[in-house]
Amino acid sequence: MRGTVLSSPEVDAEPIVNLTDKAKRHILKIREAEESPETLALWIEVVGARGGEYAYDLYFDVPANAGDGDAVLHNDDLDVVIPAASVENMRGATLDMARDLLNPGMVITNPNRPPAAPGMGSPQIAAPQPGDLTGTVEERVRQVLDQFINPSIAAHGGTASLIAVEDDTAYVRLGGGCVGCGMAAVTLSQGITVAIRDAVPEIANVVDQTDHASGTNPYYEAAKK
């Protein structure tokens, strides 16, 4: 698998994250919609754990905002920043494009697994388990969004709300900074969907009802009439 191996002299010489060529091209295309794109780095942060896997938040910010211990991974045309608390959890991971045509977008394959016990520390939040929730299916889905999803994505100006539940499908709408964000597909597939499925077994599908074309930087092009 071709790609770019990124490492940080601030941490050590070992690779931390591998970006495939397809993922890198996709990220650069998304970044072009941002203001002053050449000044922005891709930030990858572990924000929780569900079902034995880490969950992630991907966003753009300037490398200068990196703090002590954050890994700044330098590349010719795309720097990547991994917050200090996520470095060891991300070591050896690969960011790639999904091969599932029904669920396109970026995916992270990570050889690391979260500890069996919760409590990884801020800003990571342990997801609610089925036994922790009460009420109807719709009420329990709202609890997942309120207790887990929104506290995680609020740090970057995003929100998620439940529109409806029909049969085994939950319809959600993203708001704030998630509207028109090219990273929203990752947030939905590797964050929101996994959390809801794990906590509310009756839900098999999560559908995004967001009008992303109305966002500041839309990544869905409106259909031509």
Image (cartoon, rainbow, N blue to C red):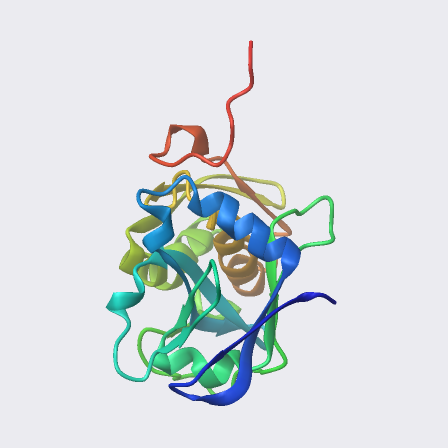
Q: How many marks?
A: 0
Compared to residue 138, the image places residue 133 above or below, namely below
Quadrant for residue 24, please give it.
bottom right
Determine the residue positioned at 71% across, 44% down.
Answer: 102
| For residue 158, side relative to residue 164 (left or right) | left
Q: Can residue 22 be seen here?
A: yes
State which quarter of the image contains the C terminus: top right
x%, y% of residue 52? 59, 77
Which is nearer the eye, 200 or 42? 42
| For residue 215, side relative to residue 186 (left or right) | left
Residue occupying the far front of the picture: 76
Compared to residue 65, the image places residue 157 above or below, namely above
Residue occupying the far top of the picture: 225
Determine the residue positioned at 51% across, 44% down.
Answer: 29
Which is nearer the eye, 162 or 132? 162
Compared to residue 98, the image places residue 166 above or below, namely above
x%, y% of residue 9? 42, 85
State which quarter of the image contains the N terminus: bottom right
Q: Can residue 143 be seen here?
A: no
| For residue 184, side relative to residue 146 (left or right) | right
Which is nearer the eye, 37 or 123? 37
x%, y% of residue 175? 35, 42
Determine the residue positioned at 73% across, 51% down.
Answer: 100
x%, y% of residue 143? 39, 57
